[in-house]
Amino acid sequence: MHLEEMKKEIEQLVLEKGFYNKPDDIPKKLLFAFIELGEASDAWKKGTSQEKIAEELIDVIFYILDTSRLACPSINMDEAFTKKLQKNKNREYQYGEEHRKTRTTQKPSERD
Ligand SMILES: [Mg+2]
């Protein structure tokens, strides 16, 4: 299933269940995504099953895609993902990872 298909499934669920569905609800949805990230972190810290960790991460994806549906409805998220992936692929090694530069500036393959 692709992101755009997921968005449609999520929208159907939101409408069926009467969940928040207005642009004014966007901050709440983003907050819920953060809460789900916290749940994923807790699940990992507690050593719970990979299935439980994955479930919490999927909850994050649900809220993110649901937010995108309301916040940027004209954007195709599959295309946006592909575009952003390509942008990230074109970045330098350890781009934005300043903390790592204090440890090494070499790629793993260049170390002895
Ligand atoms: Mg959850």
Image (cartoon, grey):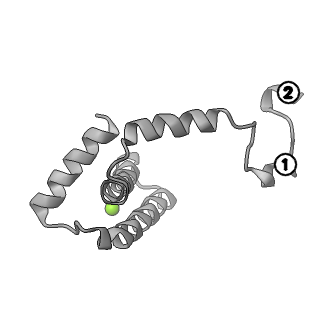
> Tag 2: residue type?
Glu
In the picture provided, is 79 more to the left or to the right than 99? left
Quick check: 102 above or below 23?
above
User: Which x, y percent locates residue 27?
Assistant: 39, 72
Q: Residue at x 31, y 59 (%)?
A: 70
Q: Secondary structure at mark 2?
A: helix
Q: Residue at x 62, y 38 (%)?
A: 88
Q: Which mark is residue 58?
A: none
Q: Residue at x 13, y 67 (%)?
A: 18
User: Which x, y percent locates residue 53?
Assistant: 40, 52
Quick check: 75 above or below 26?
above
User: Which x, y percent locates residue 26?
Assistant: 35, 68
Q: Return the residue at label 2.
A: 110
Residue 24 occupies which quadrant of the picture? bottom left
Quick check: 3 above or below 100?
above
In the picture provided, is 14 more to the left or to the right than 96? left
Residue 112 occupies which quadrant of the picture? top right
Query: Residue 10 or 34: which is nearer the viewer?
Result: 10
Q: Which mark is residue 101?
A: 1
Q: Residue at x 35, y 59 (%)?
A: 67
> Tag 1: residue type?
Lys
Residue sitting at the far front:
74
Query: Residue 108 or 60: which is nearer the viewer?
Result: 60
Query: How far apart are labels 1 and 2 at the CA level?
Result: 15 Å
Q: Secondary structure at mark 1?
A: helix
